Image: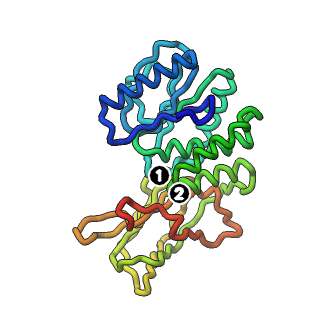
Amino acid sequence: MKIVPQLYMLTFASADCDDLYSKSVQLTIKMLASKHNGKFKIKNKDLRREKLEKPRRKLLQIFNVSKERNELANLNVFECGWPECLAPALEKLCTICKEMDRWLELCTDNVVVIHQKGGFRRAAVVVSAFMHYCSICASESQMLEHLAMQQYCKQHSLLPSQRRYVQNFANLLSERIQVNSEPVVLYTLVVRGLTKRCPVYFKIYGKMVPVFTSNVVTGSGAEVLVARFRPPVSLRGDILLKCCSAEDEFHQKCTLFQCQFNTCTVNNHSCRKIVFKNDELDYPISGR
């Protein structure tokens, strides 16, 4: 799918079998290489293995936003993948946009292909971020394609945390918000509106590494749950917060909701609390 003359989208459903997927990728790469004389890069947005064959043309370069593979060892590969159910780090978004801009500016014939197997959100996140990047940082020629990228983004819904990260990225680019270099200290967490009075616990990740797991807590009534952290938890950078049930009706643990934010976008001087409304939380497939 062509978004703009120099930007293509190549997405596949996660249910596609490996053989069908591999053949589709190879055919698409050959078509693009023939059409653009080999001058394109592929941004592959998966964490799973991608069977991308070594191109015949020396000018073909691959941006592999997926797990590193031996099949790509002899190619010029740029790795920057993340899970479909999460938002990418702000630093990763910035790096992707800079690399895309650099490649497109090298030659007017150069083309970028954003590749993803399994869903569409990660590809849409990159297009959304690059749209904002082009409107502020890139050349006038790329700004003319802003509306086409905007139209593509409107056709695909992102997770709340993904939308938050794209908006934070745009705000940082335009300097509408200033970077906070101080950590955010978490003393208390309040959850309102839980439909079940089930015991839950909270898991906190910093840069995708577990940094804290709370004790199991139970709501005190009126659908309000309060968890106090002693000692307080110091957070910095990209944070993922998960609220998990200690056990469901099948005596299994599950995630009730999760959300992501970056502490660099939080103003410590004017913000005494961080509030996420119901529609700003990422919910699991079960819809709880």
- Residue at disc 1, secondary structure: loop
Res. 91 visible in picture: no
Q: Tell me residue 251's x, y (percent).
A: 23, 69
Residue closer to the observer: 150 or 163: 150
Q: Residues within 10 Å of mark 2 (few under 14, many from 20)?
A: many
> Mark number for residue 161?
2
Q: Tell me which residue sits at (43%, 45%) in the image.
A: 119
> Mark number for residue 233?
none
Question: As shown in the figure, which amino acid type bears the numbered disc 2?
Answer: Ser
Res. 81 visible in picture: yes
Residue closer to the observer: 241 or 136: 136
* Mark 1, residue position: 86
- Residue at disc 2, secondary structure: helix
Q: Residue furthest right?
A: 140
Q: Is residue 172 above or below residue 244?
A: above
Q: Earlier in the sequence, mark 1 or mark 2?
A: 1
Indicate the quadrant containing the C terminus: top left, top right, bottom left or bottom right.
bottom left
Please identify the quarter of the rendering in which residue 101 is found.
top right
Residue closer to the observer: 37 or 79: 37
Q: Tell me residue 57's x, y (percent).
A: 51, 13
Q: Are marks 1 and 2 in contact (CB under 8 Å)?
A: yes
Residue closer to the observer: 217 or 150: 150
Q: Is residue 179 above or below residue 126?
A: below
Q: Residue furthest bottom?
A: 221
Please identify the quarter of the rendering in which residue 265 is found.
bottom right
Please identify the quarter of the rendering in which residue 211 is found.
bottom left
Whole-angstrom CA distance, mark 1 to mark 2, is 7 Å
